[in-house]
Image (tube, rainbow, N blue to C red):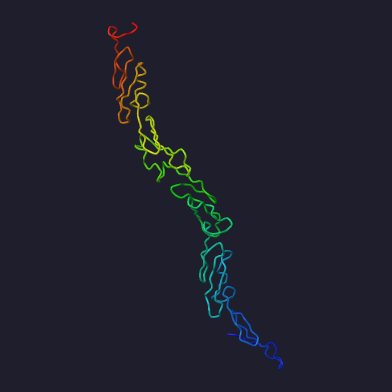
Amino acid sequence: EQLCPDPDTAHDKVSDWTCTCVAPAVGAATAATATCVLDECVADCPTCEKDVCAAPWQTCDDTDTAVGALSDWTCNCVAPAVGTAPARPAACTLDECIAACTGCENDACPAGTQGCIDVDVSPDAQGTWRCACLPPTVGTAPLAAAVCTLDECSTTCGSCENGACAPADQQECNDPDVSAGSPGDWVCECKLPYKGRSPQGTAACTLDECTATCGTCAAATCRASRQTCDDPNKSPTSTRDWSCNCRAPAVGSRVAWVAKCVLDECADTCTS
């Protein structure tokens, strides 16, 4: 629908009439049919946008401004945010791990060893990304590359301890360098009173009941009686097999207790 105003109706003023589009469409042409357009992003009409696309993160776009093409406008998120929706507000997101913007990750997390996580992708929540180390390494850092660690004693991986330090009551795992670049340096170390260690494998723990401090150990018992101690089997499972032995020239031995020493001065060589 168009209107036809004639600005000057004098008989000698001809061909000065215009075709004018009816609001909310716009357009005019002199002495010809106007090309009317209806941009629903800027016009005021029942189907128009009317500030539905909320600033500052959204703009409106009407891809077809023909008068008969109604409700075809969209809300489009402003870069670096992404998102679009037809004839309604868009759900804009700004994933700083994949977007290119000032303050975004921008390849700060080293590829292959770390990944990026943006915990809040709302366009209004910027500076919420962090670098996270990829398994089996651990570590995170906000807005920067993380310092990754690999404790091979507590992690499951190809080079890790993976339960090798057993039984747990006799030995434990120790990783002296937990930096991600130092794999294969863990050791199994025997717990006191046991002794022994083994790199990257189960330790062969021993229990010398003559020198260790434990409930079944003998060092103090024999020493108090000025006797020597001997543990013939140092396996952790072989306990109370130690013996106190008399010092020469006295003779005598007793398993798991103080020996009864004798000195036969007729048969032995001694100073008396």
* Drawn side of residue 193 relative to residue 125, left or right: left
Estimate the x, y position of residue 31 in percent, counting from the top left: 65, 88
Estimate the x, y position of residue 28 in percent, counting from the top left: 63, 83
Residue that appears at 50% across and 48% down: 140
Estimate the x, y position of residue 45 in percent, counting from the top left: 56, 76
Q: Where is residue 35, by image quadrant?
A: bottom right
Q: Disc count in the image? A: 0
* Drawn side of residue 120 relative to residue 238, left or right: right
Quadrant placement of the C terminus: top left
**Frontmost residue, 235 versus 56:** 235
Q: Where is residue 269, by image quadrant?
A: top left
Residue found at the far top of this picture: 272
Quadrant placement of the N terminus: bottom right
Estimate the x, y position of residue 118 in percent, counting from the top left: 51, 55
Residue that appears at 45% across and 44% down: 150
Relative to 28, say whether 142 is above or below: above
Relative to 178, say whether 14 is above or below: below
Relative to 89, say whether 4 is above or below: below
**Frontmost residue, 111 versus 66:** 111
**Frontmost residue, 269 versus 88:** 269
